[in-house]
Image: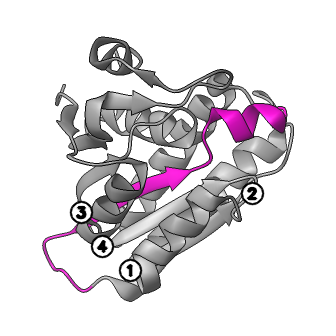
Amino acid sequence: MTPIRFIEDTGSYAHRTRVNAQWADLTVAIAVDLNTSGEQLTRDSAGDRYLGLTISNGLRIGEDRLVKTAIAHGIKTADWINENVINPDGVKINIAGNGMRTLAKNGISQETVDYFMGIFVKALYDKLDAYDFPIIEIRSGGQTGIDEAGIKAAHKMNLKCSILAPKDFRMTPAQGEDIFDKELFIARFQ
């Protein structure tokens, strides 16, 4: 299996967000709330290479709406790539979205997001494969929630994937203060 590449950025959350958006052909943000300050920064940083997709409050594993939404979002993302990315070698995708602090407030667990993103990445991959459009790499900022789940899903599918983490591997848990711990950061993906 292709290992996840962990890269430590030289700056803050905001710097990492801008670098990831500049690196990608598309930043796809998946969120309950696309208007948090973090999501606004992501949208501003990605400019016209941004696709924002919403999910419903209280999603649960086993619900039809979770599966239907994940597949629809994967197909919509692939269609956007097919229509807007002109690199014949493939596409570099930055996965962003709400962290667990926001998702937990809206009744969504990390386990549920992991499941959702597994379906999303598979639908995205399958539709891009039908277009004969390869994925060069998937990247995220490695935060809890959507970032974490997107990389886990890409890794399980043996896609090249990386995390550009904020300086000192800073992460925001669902509750409490930020944590600065490289080993704990990496352990979430193993």
Of badges 3 and 2, nearer the viewer stands 2
Q: Distance between the residues labelled 4 and 2?
A: 23 Å
Work out whether mark 3 precedes mark 2 in sequence or the reverse, and give the earlier one.
Answer: 2
> Is label 3 in a helix, a strand or a loop?
loop
Work out whether mark 1 precedes mark 4 in sequence or the reverse, and give the earlier one.
Answer: 4
Residue type at numbered disc 2:
Asp
Residue type at numbered disc 3:
Pro
On screen, 83 above or below 161?
below
Q: In the image, which residues are magenta?
A: 86-107
Instruction: Identify the disc placed on residue 82.
Output: 1
> Is label 2 in a helix, a strand or a loop?
loop
Work out whether mark 3 precedes mark 1 in sequence or the reverse, and give the earlier one.
Answer: 1
On screen, 45 above or below 68?
below
Residue carrying label 2? 33
Of badges 1 and 2, nearer the viewer stands 2
Work out whether mark 4 precedes mark 2 in sequence or the reverse, and give the earlier one.
Answer: 4
> Is label 1 in a helix, a strand or a loop?
helix
Residue carrying label 4? 25
Q: Distance between the residues labelled 3 and 4?
A: 13 Å
Instruction: Identify the disc placed on residue 134.
Output: 3
